[in-house]
Amino acid sequence: MSGAGFRAGVLVLAALALAGCASTSERQAEQARRQRLADTHTQLGASYLQRGQLEIAKENLEKALIADPDSSQAANMMALLQWRLRNYAEAERYFHKAVDVEQSNPEAQNNYGVFLCERGRPDEAIEWFGKAAANPLYKTPDMAQANAGACLMRKPAPTVAEKHFREALVHNPKLPVALNYMAKISYDSGRPIAARGFIQRYFQAADDTPETLLLAVRIERALRNRNEEGSYALRLKAKFPDSPEAVQLQRERAGVRAR
């Protein structure tokens, strides 16, 4: 090949290489644009879902999945929407998509666990809660552990559930749901002193509820602390006079007096 021919060949190859780079760069830019669009619509969909505007939420999540069919977070939010609409088969399909596309999406794993527990499949649920809690990038592993415990309480399996609640409290010592359950488990298993400690920690971390106040009454009654029992009873009757717990308290106290 002559020098001129060689140079021409080099120029052609160089041009092809540049064309390839440009094409790759354009594809990457388009992919990034579509991901940004999907993220925007996912955020909008989540916001509308939270406000109960389900139709607008659905429109935005559909747009997100059109822009990026592989968006794990968009699939996760669509699963939550379908669950809200009681389209359980569709919800599970989208949960599967969310955890398959991005196997390290702990939010989707936790949500899928809650879904499975609600659908009466606790053993599968515990597996997904475990995956979420074990992910070092998950910001709230305490919630996955607490969800696992709450799911196990529905079986019921309080002894195993207690391990999850204790693990949740290692991550977040003020987590109300874990403190409430630990107080209940301790009381039910004949450990009223431990139950008192957990219920007192609960009241320091969260607002009164009829359930927790009635439990506090029972704990103090078991410990024969009449003043504290009466104090919690007054709080229950004053704050939630028409609650089933207030009615139950009245029956219990009538039964104690009758004996």
Image (cartoon, grey):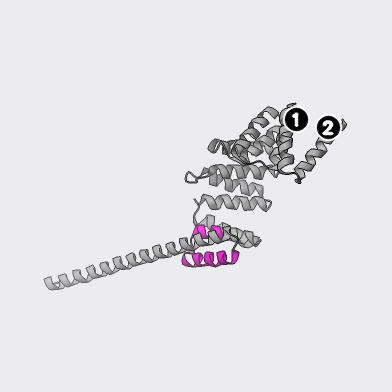
Residue 163 x %, y %? 61, 36
Q: Which residue is rendered at x = 59% and y = 63% of the image?
A: 53
Residue that label 1 marks = 221
Residue 150 lies in the magenta-colored region = no
Left or right, 230 with reference to 179: right
Residue 232 occupies which quadrant of the picture?
top right
Say which amino acid is labelled 1. Answer: Arg
**Magenta stretch?**
54-78
Q: Main secondary structure of the magenta part?
A: helix
Q: Is residue 188 visible?
A: no
Left or right, 254 with reference to 23: right
Q: CA distance from mark 1 to mark 2?
A: 10 Å
Q: Nearer the viewer, residue 126 or 30?
A: 30
Residue 67 in the image: above or below residue 73? below
Residue that label 2 marks = 256
Say which amino acid is labelled 2. Answer: Val
* Secondary-structure class at tag 2: helix
